[in-house]
């Protein structure tokens, strides 16, 4: 799973020191039979398995600890892959009162005729503890039959995982009923709130043996769907695509998805900066990648496809081809209209994210572009002068050059209201006349009204600018 790092202020061990690994597991009261457990994801394409990834025991918990620390002088998982730079510092076993009595302190087999019972898990792990020096703790939990019990388990897991832990792995094989689900949610919480890495969530299946033994399955790829939904929610709520882009550029994603993730991040950042000329072009490039994205996939790519489809729909209205140079002087009426429509779509998005300064800035610049489109060919000044400020210039240009009276009136209405709201934002609502705008409800209402008016202004094609010649009456 994705390594999310740690929050600011949390100490890390020296970079030259191994990271501290905390192994958590459940112990139940079921039958535990001797078998050889192996890590299913270590099977090669030729169906071979390195012996380092097999361990025999009646307890999957013991097998996993042996797999972590290694045996016979050979390094285990702690010297391999995602756990290469870690050392086992803690082992925590969650168990009910019944499990403590029947499987931890001693193995009290309810069926004596089945043969001699193995030692309790405590004794088996204590032997490994003596050899490898990790801290061993048993924590009692409830059975999880009620909501109160589920919160009790959730909080017990949170308390067991401390800021001293850098990496956490969890074995949910013998979690009773709802316990694995609660554990998954708790792990997701500590990853995102405490920034602790959780590279593996294991489930051993002794009842479906293969030629290699009983498989231990890594559930962490399934748990990653929580990352996707969280990252997508963040994009939709705030416009920030960093977390989603990171998931798309992970090593197990197809190259085209990685490229799409990089471009998505660029588009989202351009919108959030109110980079008016950049985001239409970047959104266009994003949409061009859609034809190459995976279709009708299985496995982890199936939900990813739905995320990608939603992203495409989100940025579709922002995409347009921007003419080289100043679009107001080099673009056609059709190009200017498409560009302005993309600006209005971006303003609507920014308003939903409560990024008011960017929203109204985009709208003002869009209106300025529309004014320039009609005033530039006639030779009217394109920069403010002491006699003609920006607002007056926009009004006279839109009134006299090109737009019919009704649309010119709409444009003037947009201009006047934009100027008032933007002044309130520019001056931090200090003036008494600006304080009426100091509230989400007011800004949302004004923003929605201005966006609707702008959309109406652009509903029909724009007429080309009327070019005046010397001597024409203005």
Image (cartoon, rainbow, N blue to C red):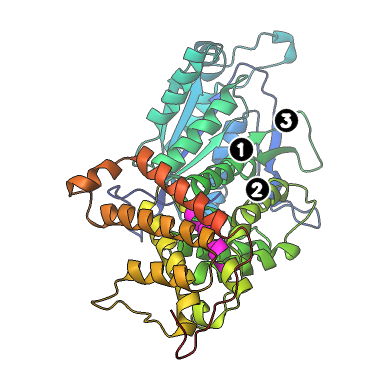
Disc 3 secondary structure class: loop
Binning the other alpha carbons within 10 Å of mark 1 as few (below 14), some (14 to 19) or many (20 upward) gives: many
Depth check, front residue: 9 or 26? 9
The spot of residue 467 in percent (x, y) is 53, 83
Marked residue nearer the N-terminal end (1 or 2)? 2
Q: Mark 3 and mark 2: span between their CA atoms? A: 16 Å
Mark count:
3
Circle 2 packing at 10 Å, graded few (<14), some (14-19), many (20+), is many
- The local crowd at label 3, few if under 14, some if 14 to 19, many if 20 or more residues have their Cα within 10 Å, is many
Query: Which labelled disc corresponds to residue 53?
Result: 2
> Which region of the structure is painted magenta?
338-348
Q: What is the quadrant of residue 106 in the picture?
A: top right
Q: Residue furthest left?
A: 431
Residue, disc 1? 202
Query: For mark 3, what is the residue?
Result: 206
Q: Residue at x 53, y 29 (%)?
A: 183
The answer to whether residue 84 is seen in the rendering is no
């Amino acid at each position: 799973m994705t390594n999310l790092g740690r929050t600011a202020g949390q100490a890390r061990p020296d970079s030259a020191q191994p990271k501290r690994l905390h192994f958590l597991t459940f112990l139940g009261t079921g039958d535990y039979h001797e078998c050889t457990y192996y890590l299913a994801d270590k099977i090669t394409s030729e169906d071979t398995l390195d012996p380092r990834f097999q361990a025999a025991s009646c307890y999957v918990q013991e097998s996993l600890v042996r797999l972590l620390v290694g045996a016979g002088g050979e390094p285990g998982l702690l010297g391999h892959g995602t756990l290469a730079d870690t050392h086992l510092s803690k082992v925590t076993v969650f168990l009910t009162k019944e499990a403590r009595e029947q499987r931890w302190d001693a193995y009290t087999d309810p069926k004596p005729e089945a043969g001699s019972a193995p030692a309790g898990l405590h004794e088996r792990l204590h032997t490994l503890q003596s050899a490898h020096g990790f801290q061993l703790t048993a924590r009692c939990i409830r059975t999880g039959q009620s909501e109160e019990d589920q919160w009790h388990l959730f909080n017990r897991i949170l308390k067991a995982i401390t800021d001293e832990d850098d990496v956490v792995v969890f074995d949910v094989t013998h979690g009773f009923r709802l316990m694995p689900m609660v554990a998954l949610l708790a792990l997701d919480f500590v990853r995102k709130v405490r920034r602790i890495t959780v590279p593996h969530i294991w489930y051993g299946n002794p009842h479906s043996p293969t030629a290699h033994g009983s498989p231990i399955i890594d559930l962490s790829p399934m748990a990653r769907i929580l990352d996707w939904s969280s990252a997508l929610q963040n994009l939709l709520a705030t416009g920030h695509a960093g977390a989603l882009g990171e998931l798309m550029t992970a090593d197990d994603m197809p190259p085209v998805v990685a490229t799409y993730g990089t471009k998505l991040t660029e588009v989202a950042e351009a919108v959030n900066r109110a980079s008016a000329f950049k985001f239409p072009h970047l959104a266009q490039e994003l949409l061009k990648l859609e034809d190459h994205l995976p279709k009708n996939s299985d496995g982890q790519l199936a939900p990813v496809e739905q995320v990608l489809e939603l992203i495409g729909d989100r940025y579709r209205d922002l995409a347009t081809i921007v003419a080289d140079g100043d679009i107001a002087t080099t673009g056609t009426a059709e190009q200017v209209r498409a560009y302005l429509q993309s600006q209005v779509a971006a303003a609507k998005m920014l308003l939903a994210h409560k990024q008011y300064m960017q929203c109204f800035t985009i709208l003002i610049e869009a209106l300025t572009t529309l004014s320039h489109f009609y005033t530039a060919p006639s030779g009217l000044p394109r920069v403010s002068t002491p006699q003609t400020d920006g607002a007056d210039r926009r009004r006279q240009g839109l009134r006299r050059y090109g737009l019919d009276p009704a649309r010119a009136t709409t444009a003037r209405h947009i201009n006047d209201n934009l100027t008032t709201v933007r002044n309130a934002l520019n001056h931090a609502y200090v003036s008494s006349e600006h304080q009426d705008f100091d509230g989400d409800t007011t800004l949302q209402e004004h923003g929605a009204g201005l966006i609707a008016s702008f959309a109406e202004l652009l509903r029909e094609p724009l007429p080309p600018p009327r070019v005046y010649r010397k001597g024409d009456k203005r």
